[in-house]
Amino acid sequence: MKYIKQLTIILGISAIGEFLNFLLPLPIPASIYALGLMLLLLCTGTLKLSAVKETSALLLDAMPIMFIPAAAGIINYWDIIKPILIPCFLILIVTTVIVMAVTGITTQAIIKRKESKDNA
C-alpha cells in the first residue's frame, strides 16, 4: 500500500507538470516542470522525502531498462549516423568535459560558501 501511495504522489506531480506544460506557452517539457515542482516541494518541506523515497528508488533502479529501446533504435538509423559519427563523439566528449568542470566548480563554490557560514 505504501508503494501505491508514493506512486500516486509522483504521478500526481507529473500530471501537474503536464498541466503546466499545456497551460504555459514555453518550450519546456512537462517532465522538467514536474521535476522543478518536486524539488520545490521537497526543499520547502511541503513534501517529506519519506513520502516518495522507496518508490523513487525503485523507479531509479528500473531507469536503465528504459534506455534500451532508444539505443536499439539507433541501429535503424546507422546509415544516417555513420557519416557524422566522429563529430558526434567530439561534441559528446567536449560537452561532457564542460559539464563536469561546471559541476565541479559549482560544487566547490557551494562547499566553500557553506564552510564560511559554519565558521562565521
Image: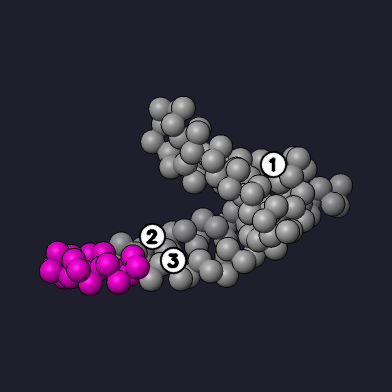
User: What secondary structure do most residues of the magenta stretch adopt?
Assistant: helix
- Distance of label 1 from label 3 (alpha carbons): 26 Å
Q: Residue at x 70, y 63 (%)?
A: 54
> Which range of residues does the magenta coloring cover?
69-89
Q: Quadrant of residue 50?
A: bottom right
Q: Residue at x 43, y 39 (%)?
A: 28
Decide if residue 72 is on the left or right side of residue 68.
left
Q: Residue at x 71, y 46 (%)?
A: 42
**Residue 10, x across and y down, in percent:** 62, 49
Relative to 75, say whether 20 is above or below: above
Decide if residue 33 is on the left or right side of residue 6.
left
Q: Earlier in the sequence, mark 2 or mark 3?
A: 3
Q: Earlier in the sequence, mark 1 or mark 2?
A: 1
Q: Quadrant of residue 37?
A: top right
Q: Are marks 1 and 2 in contact (CB under 8 Å)?
A: no
- Distance of label 2 from label 3 (alpha carbons): 23 Å
Of labels 1 and 2, the one closer to you:
1
Amino acid type assigned to the residue bearing label 3 in the image:
Met
**Residue 89, x across and y down, in percent:** 29, 68
Specify how the rendered protein is coloured.
one colour
SS under mark 1? helix
**Residue 114, x across and y down, in percent:** 76, 52
Label 3, on which residue? Answer: 66
The residue lying toward the viewer, choosing from 100 and 59, is: 59
Label 2, on which residue? Answer: 95
